[in-house]
Amino acid sequence: MKKITLFLLLISLAMNLKAQTASENKLLAAVEKLRLGMISGNRADLESITSKDLSYGHSSGKIEDYTAFVETFASGKSDFVTADFNKQTVKIAGKTALVRHQLDAKTNDGGKPGEVHLGILLVWHKEGKDWKLFGRQAYKLP
């Protein structure tokens, strides 16, 4: 009986690990789509991974909603030439995920070249089978 119980426990753990890995892989694909969308400004890509209830916070304290976020990147007002997400960590709890990383980017906002090095917290929520960006907060690094 103990062997059967142990066997069932191991199967259960393996199934949970596989589900977690699949969910994490799908989340990481959404994060990458966000990164590429921020560089390309592709409206359809940005809209497809963003919750309509988005709260997008900048390190300056400015907050944008879904419409403003998409328009800022699609119009080129915010122009990322490069964007690297470094030191990334992921935590998933049910239908919510937290992704932290350091954003190192070259920008060209308004034709003015610049660089940013910020800490970022992304909050993702699972809508149906897809991860959607629900919140983002940037902060200045020490």
Image (spheres, rainbow, N blue to C red):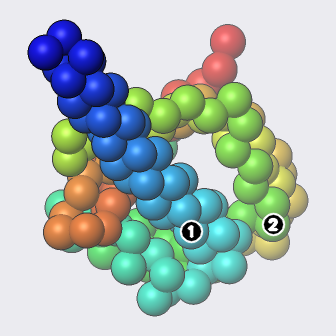
* Tag 2 residue: 81
Residue in the image at 38% along x and 52% along y: 23
Residue at the extreme left of the image, as rendered: 1
User: Mark 2: which secondary structure?
Assistant: strand
In percent of width and height, residue 90 lies at 48, 34
Q: Earlier along the polypeptide chain: callout 2 or callout 1?
A: 1
Q: Position of residue 124 (x, y in %)?
A: 33, 49
Q: Nearer the viewer, mark 2 or mark 1?
A: 1
Closer to the camera in the image, 72 or 101: 101
- In the image, residue 78 above or below residue 60: below
- The residue that appears at 67% across and 12% down in the rendered structure is 142
52 or 12: nearer the eye? 12
User: Distance between the Cα atoms at labels 2 and 1?
Assistant: 15 Å
In the picture, the disc for residue 70 is none
Helix, strand or loop at mark 1: helix
Three-letter code for the amino acid on which mark 2 is drawn: Val
Image x and y of residue 29, in percent? 54, 62
Identify the residue position indicated by label 1 in the image: 33
Quadrant showing the N terminus? top left
Tell me which residue sits at (72%, 37%) in the image: 86
Going 25% across and 34% down the picture, which residue do you hit? Answer: 12
Q: Residue 127 location, x and y as percent?
A: 19, 64
